[in-house]
């Protein structure tokens, strides 16, 4: 779809015009763009991620790469972590918008990724999680 393509090209700008569910929560700001989602609810969703990922100064990662600094990072580039070829070749810059798409169905967005996670089908859950990650990984 045309609109979707545009969103990928201008991920950040697109956030501003994409309607987002769960509007009652405090917006979190990413590079001046407000991302709505509830970080507290997101913390619960993130437990699924922390089975494999770490944040902060806990090293390069457990099973998956350390997620600190993930926003603005190009996929597959955290030094010292051994990525799949697929993730290195994906060449996406992680933003709220690209994460939203990746986390819906990781193996669809990055075919052959070694991240064994089926995805989060519920948009609200993804947006809460991303709001949490924005705070937690910066
Ligand atoms: C079963 C373990 C597992 C779970 C659960 C998991 N991941 Fe991952 N994740 C990985 C692995 C392994 C990779 C590396 C993928 C590759 O190299 O193909 C990865 C890669 C990533 C990347 C790319 C990072 C980079 O530096 O390019 C992001 C972002 C990410 N995961 C976010 C998440 C989030 C958010 C969740 C929770 C919804 C999650 N993951 C759940 C194992 C997991």
Image: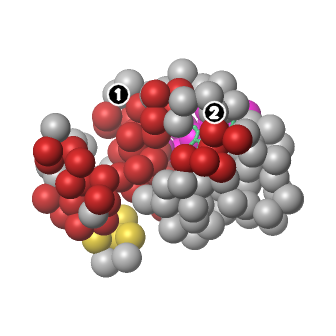
Residue located 82% across and 47% down the image: 82
The answer to which quarter of the image holds residue 126 is top left
Residue underneath mark 1: 122
Say what secondary structure mark 1 lies in. loop
Image quadrant where one finds the C terminus: bottom right
Q: Can residue 13 be seen in this view?
A: yes
Say what secondary structure mark 2 lies in. loop
Residue underneath mark 2: 113
**Badge 2 residue CB within 8 Å of ligand 1:** yes
Relative height, residue 13 to residue 112 (above, below): below
Image x and y of residue 10, in percent:
27, 63
- Please state if 62 lies on the left or on the right of 14 as rendered: right
Residue located 54% across and 21% down the image: 118
Q: Is residue 24 visible?
A: no
- Please state if 37 lies on the left or on the right of 19 as rendered: right
Q: How far apart are marks 2 and 1 (CA)?
A: 21 Å
Residue found at the very far bottom of the displayed protein: 32
């Amino acid at each position: 779809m045309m609109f979707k393509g545009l969103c990928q090209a201008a991920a950040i700008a697109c956030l501003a015009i994409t309607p987002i569910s769960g509007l009652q929560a405090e917006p979190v700001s990413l590079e001046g763009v407000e991302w709505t989602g509830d970080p507290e609810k997101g913390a619960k969703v993130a437990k699924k991620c922390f089975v494999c990922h770490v944040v902060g100064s806990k090293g390069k990662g457990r099973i998956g790469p350390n997620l600190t600094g993930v926003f603005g990072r190009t996929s597959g580039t955290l030094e010292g972590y051994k990525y799949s070829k697929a993730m290195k070749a994906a060449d996406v810059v992680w933003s709220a918008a690209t994460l939203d798409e990746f986390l819906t169905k990781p193996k669809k967005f990055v075919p052959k990724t070694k991240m064994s996670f089926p995805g989060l089908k519920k948009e609200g859950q993804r947006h809460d999680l991303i709001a949490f990650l924005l705070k937690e990984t910066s």
